[in-house]
Amino acid sequence: MEIPYWISSLIFSFSSSITSRLSPDRTLSFHFLEQPPTNWIDNRSGFTPFSTAQREFTRDVFSYFSSIIDVKFVETTTYSGFNTIVLGNNDQGGSGSAGYMTGAPGDEAWGLFMSNVHSGAGQIADPKNSPTFLYTYLHELGHVLGLKHPFGNTLPILSDAEDNFDLTIMTYGSKSPGIQAPTSILLQPLDIAALQYLYGPSKTAANASSDDTYILDHNGRNFIWDGGGTDKLDASASSKRLVLALEPFTQGYFGAAATVLISANGQITINGGTLIEQV
Ligand SMILES: [Ca+2]
Ligand SMILES: [Ca+2]
Ligand SMILES: [Zn+2]
């Protein structure tokens, strides 16, 4: 199956090496480092453990991710190499870096490190209410789970029209200065589509245990996902021509023809792993 641009623009070439870390029962471990392992070189500069508030925030974030993708995140008190997402703060120098992901092939760890100097220093006590921390943390965790930037030199990328915070937290937002990053724990439609391509939809989300009807909107975006049950798409509110495929990764549309952008009004797509039974 050809993967559409709105997913391939957000997936690392090595994302399968990340998803292969998932255990057979669909668990990923995460671990708050108290100190970096002695054999580490790259990530130990100025290391400090996560604060209590950062740990509470982290548990909330993983709980939210579990409501989107079919992964259980389990906190562990032991560090066991590449099966465990590690979390800590360190000194990322004077560049103003707020955080970074590690976990590409060849890296010494899999996880994320938040800055504890300069602008990063202030967020440690109250991460929930630091917009910069909140956005950076979700963005880096997106990287940790296999998402890349939708811009830059690693093709494919999104067009400027879709490279914005309304569609993905993996953007830097520079193409659309008027659109701000989320200020609460939130993934956007293209993040969800890409993560569900990698992991499938959550089996613990509310929609996984209910029979749901999704109203298709010819005046809005239609990114459809559902974790289980007997589910229906309803287009009865529109009298426009409708072309619709129930296979994931396709583009349906209201009107005469599909538009170039999946985020345009009246376009429809069903995410990977979602089964819609009725129209
Ligand atoms: Ca359902
Ligand atoms: Ca279903
Ligand atoms: Zn990034």
Image: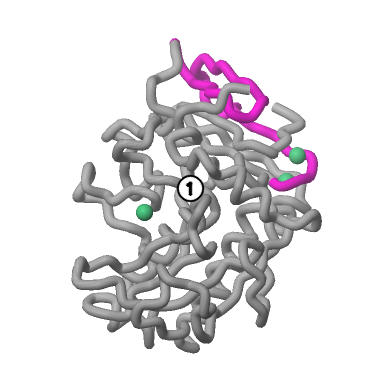
At label 1, the amino acid type is: Leu
Name the colouring of the figure.
Answer: one colour
Q: Residue at x 67, y 49 (%)?
A: 20
Q: Residue at x 70, y 35 (%)?
A: 232
Front in this rendered view, residue 39 or 78: 39
**Rendered-image quarter of ligand 3:** bottom left
Count all numbered tags in the image, as a single digit. Answer: 1
Q: Position of residue 93 (x, y in %)?
A: 24, 72
Q: Can you say which quadrant of the picture contains the C terminus?
A: top right
Front in this rendered view, residue 168 or 78: 78
Q: Quadrant of residue 22?
A: bottom right
Q: Is residue 72 above or below residue 143?
A: below
Q: Going by the image, does 197 lie left or right of 97?
A: right
Q: Position of residue 239 (x, y in %)?
A: 52, 20
Q: Can you say which quadrant of the picture contains the N terminus?
A: top right
Is 273 magenta? The answer is: no
Is 250 magenta? The answer is: yes
- Dominant SS of magenta comes to loop
Q: Quadrant of residue 73?
A: bottom right
Residue 56 visible at all: no
Q: Going by the image, does 108 lie left or right of 276?
A: left
Q: Going by the image, does 236 lie left or right of 144?
A: right
For label 1, the SS is loop
Magenta-highlighted residues? 227-256
Q: Residue at x 39, y 52 (%)?
A: 169
Residue to which mark 1 is pinned:
147
Residue 21 visible at all: yes
Q: From this viewpoint, which residue is outermost toward the top?
A: 256
Q: Residue at x 27, y 34 (%)?
A: 160
Q: Position of residue 270 (x, y in %)?
A: 60, 33
